[in-house]
Amino acid sequence: MPGATGTPVRDALFDRVPPHDDDAEMAVLGGMLMSKDAIGEVSQMIEVTDFYQPKHQTIYEAIINLFSASQPVDAVLVANQLLKSGDLDKVGGTDYLHSLVASVPTAANATYYAEIVHQRAILRNVIAAGTKIAQLGYSAEGSQAEDVVNLAQAEVYEMSVGKVRQDYSAIAPVVHDALDQIDKLQQGLVNKGVPTGFRDIDDITQGLQPGQMVVVAGRPAMGKSTLGIDFARAAALHHGLTTIVFSLEMSKVELAQRIISAETDIPLGALRRADEITPERWNTLNSFWAKLDDAPLFIDDSPNMSLMEIRAKCRRLKQTNDLKLVVIDYLQLMTSGKQVESRQQEVSEFSRALKLLAKELEVPVVALSQLNRGPEMRNDKKPQLSDLRESGSIEQDADVVFLVHRPDFYDKEDRPGEADIIMAKHRNGPTETFHLAFLGATSKFKDMPQDYNNQGV
């Protein structure tokens, strides 16, 4: 900003000492040295990096190491631990540890001080993220502006959810976590993934897993949108899990009509004809509307939706509503807003970015996709993985691929009202073909009776 004399005035923001509170840091450590309960509570609230002073980081780490090993913790034992690691003199010796204990009258306020330490750490992260974003803005070329915005959003999202970035881990703790998960699975303590609402699919997949990119593909009018909406209905309306549907093809009203029809069993055609809505059907619709209060299902039908918009909206919903499932209908209708060499390259970019979004937000992303005309060239008309349109990278990035096939679409006498959901790829388990009933009138798929597969059909 120019000053009164026209000379530039420097913003001194980044020349200041970063926010921190030495007294609060000392009080937290003093409380932890006085009480084991305080250690348990504080360790849930702050991490080593939340301390500004390096010596406080070292002391905190020593306390946590003793506590984790089920050892008693006090100033003498922590001093002994620091002596072993050669850090005692660096933190100011035994006298400093005793002064920490003396600085707090009671350990009861340790969590209050920990909150102050944590808040100051967040402010330092804000400043660091702001500096990094400013550097990105200065160093980018004009054509990279959109990439910089995405990086800036990712930076702010990561900071707000309090994730600590560590790119590598030793194998031992990772294997320990994996074995721990198996143990919890056996005890029934692990929540399954997001339910799809279909018995056999949930049995094989254990639900749609966080971080997965799930592709539902089919030829036009096969019912891929219907299956995608079925997944969203099961998650949001039947299990209370926050879900967003980005509908690039249908309007909000069309989508709402499909959801109403599927949930109430009132035919979709009747919803579009005033004379077919009888008083009984009005009662059904009103009771369904009453049930929808606070249903965590969000619909976005913005035209020409760009990838960056989708990412920004998902990040916001993750923070505000704990987003659990994303459905995008459909991949080939997305735009990047950038000039690219080929459509194939653009779709490849979308595919990769959606997989990364799934990992970043730790939610399953269901992307609907068109198939090319390959199935129609074959005698049995069955779709294959290689029929995915415009990009082999969709096949590569996806963790699960469902191909929707309805034999009666090609021949009305061939298994009318039935559909095969072919799981052509399953990164973490076996592939399978699921037989579902297709109820076109009410726009939904439904499980076959339990004994269907035993009839040799």
Image (cartoon, grey):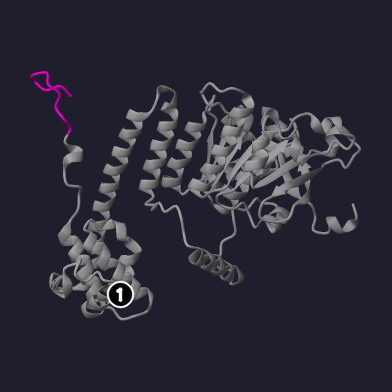
Q: Which stretch appears magenta?
A: 1-11
Amino acid under label 1?
A: Asp
- Label 1 neighbour load within 10 Å: few <14, some 14-19, many 20+: few
- Report the number of discs: 1
Report the side of 182 relative to 432 (left or right): left
Q: Residue at x 53, y 50 (%)?
A: 241
| Quadrant of the rendered image containing residue 103 | bottom left
x then y, percent, for residue 204:
70, 57
Q: Which residue in the protein does label 1 denote?
A: 37
**33 within the magenta span:** no
Report the side of 255 relative to 155 (left or right): right
Q: Nearer the viewer, residue 176 or 252?
A: 176
- The answer to whether 274 is drawn above or below residue 299 in the figure is above
Q: Residue at x 35, y 33 (%)?
A: 136
- The answer to whether 37 is drawn above or below residue 131 in the figure is below
Element under label 1? helix
x then y, percent, for residue 413:
91, 37
